[in-house]
Amino acid sequence: MEVTALSDNTRGDLFDPACPTRALLDRVGSKWTSMAVKLLAEAAPQEIRFAELRRRMPGVSQKMLATTLRALVRDGLAQRRVEPTVPPRVHYSLTPLGLSLDGPLAVLRAWAEEHMAEIDRANRDADAAG
């Protein structure tokens, strides 16, 4: 299925298989994106260095964090600044568009944290019945 680009004044449609909204939701719905956006939003308007983000995101590999941040920058949700030092210092911050994503992700994170015990129980019940 070929994905079509939307013009600036067109709204996406999740139910249209050719709409890029599906791929965007895959990207912003990942745990690493959610964590990165939360940390960057907490720091706003300050920047956070790559190394600090990695320290504050337990379990993320350097490669996965770089991939996540690259996608945020490409989507216009974050900006990257490199200090020309040896080694280079790379800093990230959210754009206004990225800051607008923090609220919806915070609601989703809160829902997941609040209902995790129920979800675990349902999974155990399903596995036992399985």
Image (cartoon, rainbow, N blue to C red):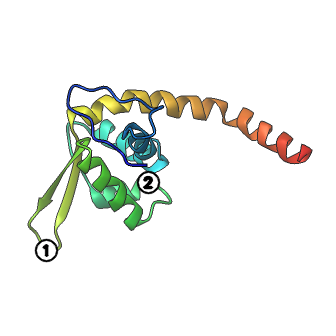
Q: Is residue 124 left or right of residue 27?
A: right
The residue that mark 1 highlights is: 86
Instruction: Please rate how many residues cluster around mark 1, counting C-alpha atoms within 10 Å: few if below 14, some from 14 to 19, many from 20.
Output: few
Instruction: Please rate how many residues cluster around mark 2, counting C-alpha atoms within 10 Å: few if below 14, some from 14 to 19, many from 20.
Output: some
Q: Residue at x 79, y 38 (%)?
A: 121
* Rendered image: mark on residue 48: none
The disc, 1 or 2, on the residue closer to the chain's N-terminal end is 2
Mark 1 residue element: loop
* Residue that sits furthest to the front in the current view: 1
* Nearer the observer, 28 or 118: 28
Q: Position of residue 98 (x, y in %)?
A: 28, 36
Rounded to the nearest whole Å, what is the CA distance between mark 1 and mark 2?
A: 24 Å
Q: Position of residue 105 (x, y in %)?
A: 43, 33
Q: Position of residue 88 (x, y in %)?
A: 16, 68
Mark 2 residue element: loop
The residue that mark 2 highlights is: 57
